[in-house]
Image (cartoon, rainbow, N blue to C red):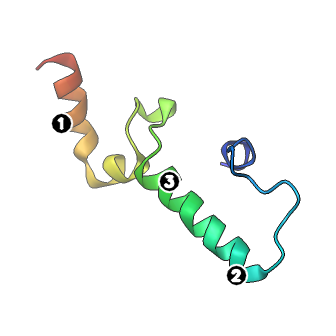
Amino acid sequence: MFRTLKYRPDYPHKGFALLEEERQWAHQFVHWYNDIHLHSGLNYVTPAQCHAGEHVTIDKEKRGI
């Protein structure tokens, strides 16, 4: 996860001025990572989809079953 985090275009390489800024950025990153980002290691579904069991239906739809 850290490699994905540090290669994000909006990664703050110079750090944060306030702790609250860091918390807000981290919250947005975790939302993106779990709910939006399609993971190659999970056959291009999100962790949230995999956790909810939706990946089975999605995989079948991709294969036309």
3 relative position to 41: left or right: right
Real-space Cα distance between discs 3 and 2?
Answer: 18 Å
* Callout 3: SS: helix
Amino acid under disc 2? Glu
Choose the circle earlier in sequence order: 2 or 1. 2
Query: Measuring 62% from the left and 73% from the top, which residue is drawn there?
Result: 24
Q: Residue 27: x and y, percent? A: 57, 68
From this view, report whether residue 25 is shown above or below residue 13: below
Amino acid under disc 1? Thr
Label 2 neighbourhood size at 10 Å, few (<14), some (14-19), many (20+)? Answer: few
Q: Which of marks 2 and 1 is in front?
A: 2
Q: Residue 61: x and y, percent? A: 17, 26
58 relative position to 31: left or right: left
Question: In the rendered structure, are the residues bearing label 2 and label 1 in contact, judged by CB atoms less than 8 Å apart?
Answer: no
Real-space Cα distance between discs 2 and 1?
Answer: 39 Å
Task: Report the residue marked by disc 3.
Answer: 32
Query: Measuring 88% from the left and 59% from the top, which residue is drawn there?
Result: 14
Amino acid under disc 3? Trp
Label 3 neighbourhood size at 10 Å, few (<14), some (14-19), many (20+)? Answer: few
Task: Report the residue marked by disc 2.
Answer: 20
Choose the circle earlier in sequence order: 3 or 1. 3
User: As drawn, which residue projects farthest toward the top?
Assistant: 64
Q: Residue 54: x and y, percent? A: 24, 45
Query: Measuring 48% from the left and 36% from the top, which residue is drawn there?
Result: 39
* Callout 2: SS: helix
Query: Measuring 72% from the left and 72% from the top, which residue is drawn there?
Result: 22
Question: In the rendered structure, are the residues bearing label 3 and label 1 in contact, judged by CB atoms less than 8 Å apart?
Answer: no
Point out which mark residue 31 bears: none
Q: Residue 65: x and y, percent? A: 11, 20
Q: Which of marks 3 and 1 is in front?
A: 3
Task: Report the residue marked by disc 1.
Answer: 57
Question: In the rendered structure, are the residues bearing label 3 and label 2 in contact, judged by CB atoms less than 8 Å apart?
Answer: no
